């Protein structure tokens, strides 16, 4: 059994195979109208190739020859994009952004004509012209890809490439706003389908889920099978134009009591629970799979639909909780000055660490194995637990928690229930959060109230134990 279900080389091969199949399918569409040989020869789009690309883009816009020809031209453009080098990809997107942007002069003229036509018989025509002027030509170009097989997936992947290239380029940022708006409309929650994934699902889908898992890596087929057992649930959202591509998925364990350690929760040797007797659903992994859909949120709808589905199936379920990572904790801890760090901890928690570090910065102790150290681990525990509570409950940016996972769950109406010592002892867990994990609890009666309170900037919903930990910090106490 390999160490990982999907190795990097397997993932690369899978992606290359997908691109090859897509390019071949689109070549067939172009061939039927004699466009297959009209392609760019330089994958960097250097020299005269840029003008040839602009000509192809203009031909797509003019849509000469009807729908069949327009579809063939879009297919040829798509094939071109799939064969470009990184430099060529950037050049393609720059041309799309700059040469096919909104025509400001035409928009001003249309707005003036509409203002003049208000109240006259020509107002409807002027309004139609104004609406057309507000759409950049590149938007029409992008929508043409939707008529192609896997065209929507192609656009999602195109935006993923764009996001990597934007930087501080205002033209690319404007193109991204157009793409984001299109995708947000196409991926409205009303179009999405919630599916439960089981061990009987297609192997190709299971392979993708293993590849996309971003929180707790799937290590083997046995590991994946364990996550799909009778006391587990695996749900994903799909779009009808991307039926084999999960957009976001959540993994759930049906257990008794709130789990505090992910290694025990995922242990294949642990006895299987009877889901009918479970009183708690633990959401232990939520992964977005499509980078091109960044900023288009539907994770909150996923959780709410899954809660509804589980509650209807298992009446004994009374608690819906996460077992979540704290991915930004160690980074935040590293950014603190020595003075800030000292100010967060009471003297009785600070002094033992200073002694063990011999008056050096005690944070360097975290870079070495310390879990089993009989002196260091007990000294670190109260300090890290308090700092974890401060980070989640008191540290904010623009009035919201600095931790991205906390923002997600608290914004969806959850509350911070408990911080778990050594909840994730994996290398990743130790590197990102010093092993800490947190339970966010979704109480059905409080979800809407918590969501509204979070949106309005009210204090974060948290248990008394978490509040007490944060309030015990001298720096937090001084602010309150």
Image: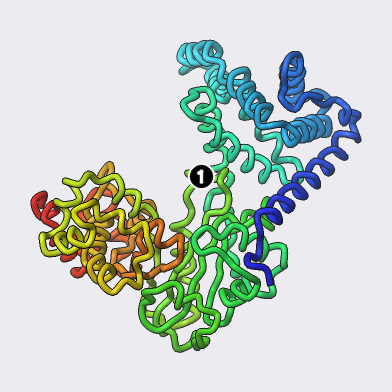
For the image, the number of numbered tags is 1
**Residue depicted at x 49% and y 86%:** 273
- Dot 1: what SS? loop
**Residue depicted at x 76% and y 22%:** 56
**Residue depicted at x 59% and y 38%:** 159
Looking at the picture, does residue 146 appear above or below residue 42? below
Rendered image quadrant of residue 409: bottom left
Q: Residue furthest front?
A: 358
x and y, in percent, of residue 92 in the image: 66, 26
x and y, in percent, of residue 243 in the image: 68, 57
x and y, in percent, of residue 268 in the image: 55, 80
Viewer-proximal residue among 470 and 280: 470
Looking at the picture, does residue 392 appear above or below residue 38? below
**Residue 437 shows in this picture:** no
Q: How is the image coloured?
A: rainbow
Looking at the picture, does residue 285 appear above or below residue 292? below
Viewer-proximal residue among 91 and 355: 355
**Residue depicted at x 55% and y 45%:** 293
Q: Which residue is mark 1?
A: 294
Q: Quadrant of the N terminus?
A: bottom right
Viewer-proximal residue among 100 and 226: 226
User: In the displayed structure, does residue 283 sit left or right of residue 336?
Assistant: right
User: In the displayed structure, does residue 285 sit left or right of residue 392?
Assistant: right
Rendered image quadrant of residue 217: bottom right
**Residue 189 shows in this picture:** yes
x and y, in percent, of residue 23 in the image: 80, 41
Please rate how many residues cluster around mark 1, counting C-alpha atoms within 10 Å: few if below 14, some from 14 to 19, many from 20: some
């Amino acid at each position: 059994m390999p160490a990982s279900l999907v190795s990097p080389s397997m993932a690369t091969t899978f992606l290359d195979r997908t691109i090859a199949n897509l390019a071949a399918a689109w070549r067939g569409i172009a061939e039927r109208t004699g466009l297959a040989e009209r392609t760019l020869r330089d994958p960097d789009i250097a020299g005269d190739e840029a003008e040839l690309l602009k000509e192809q883009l203009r031909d797509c816009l003019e849509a000469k020859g009807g729908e069949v020809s327009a579809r063939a031209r879009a297919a040829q453009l798509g094939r071109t994009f799939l064969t470009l080098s990184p430099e060529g990809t950037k050049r393609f997107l720059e041309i799309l952004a700059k040469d096919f942007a909104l025509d400001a002069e035409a928009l001003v003229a249309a707005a003036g004509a509409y203002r003049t036509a208000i109240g006259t018989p020509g107002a409807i025509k002027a309004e139609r012209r104004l609406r057309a002027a507000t759409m950049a030509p590149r938007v029409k170009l992008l929508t043409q890809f939707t008529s192609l097989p896997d065209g929507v997936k192609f656009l999602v992947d195109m935006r993923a490439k764009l996001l990597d290239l934007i930087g501080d380029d205002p033209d690319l940022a404007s193109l991204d706003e157009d793409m984001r708006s299109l995708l947000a409309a196409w991926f409205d929650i009303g179009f999405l389908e919630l599916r439960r994934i089981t061990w009987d699902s297609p192997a190709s889908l299971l392979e993708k889920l293993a590849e996309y898992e971003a929180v707790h890596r799937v290590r083997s087929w046995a590991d994946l099978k364990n996550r799909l057992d009778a006391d587990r649930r695996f749900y994903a959202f799909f779009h009808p134009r991307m039926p084999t591509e999960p957009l976001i998925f959540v993994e759930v364990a049906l257990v008794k009591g709130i789990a505090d350690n992910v290694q025990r929760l995922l242990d294949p040797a642990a006895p299987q629970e009877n889901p009918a007797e479970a009183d708690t659903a633990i959401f232990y992994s939520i992964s977005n799979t499509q980078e091109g859909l960044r900023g288009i949120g539907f994770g909150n709808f996923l959780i709410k639909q899954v809660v509804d589905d589980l509650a209807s199936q298992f009446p004994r379920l009374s608690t819906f909780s996460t077992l979540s990572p704290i991915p930004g904790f160690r980074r935040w801890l590293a950014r603190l000055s020595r003075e800030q760090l000292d100010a967060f901890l009471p003297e009785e928690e600070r002094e033992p660490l200073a002694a063990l570090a011999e008056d050096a910065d005690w944070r360097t102790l975290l870079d070495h194995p310390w879990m089993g150290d009989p002196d260091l681990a007990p000294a670190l525990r109260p300090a890290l637990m308090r700092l974890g509570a401060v980070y989640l409950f008191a540290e904010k940016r623009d009035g919201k928690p600095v931790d991205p996972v906390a923002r997600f769950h608290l914004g969806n109406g959850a509350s911070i229930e408990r911080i778990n010592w050594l909840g994730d002892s994996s290398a990743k867990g130790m590197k990102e959060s010093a092993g800490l994990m947190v339970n966010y609890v979704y109480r059905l009666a409080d979800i809407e109230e918590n969501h509204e309170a979070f949106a309005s900037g009210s204090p974060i919903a948290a248990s008394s134990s978490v509040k007490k930990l944060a309030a015990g910090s001298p720096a937090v106490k001084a602010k309150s």
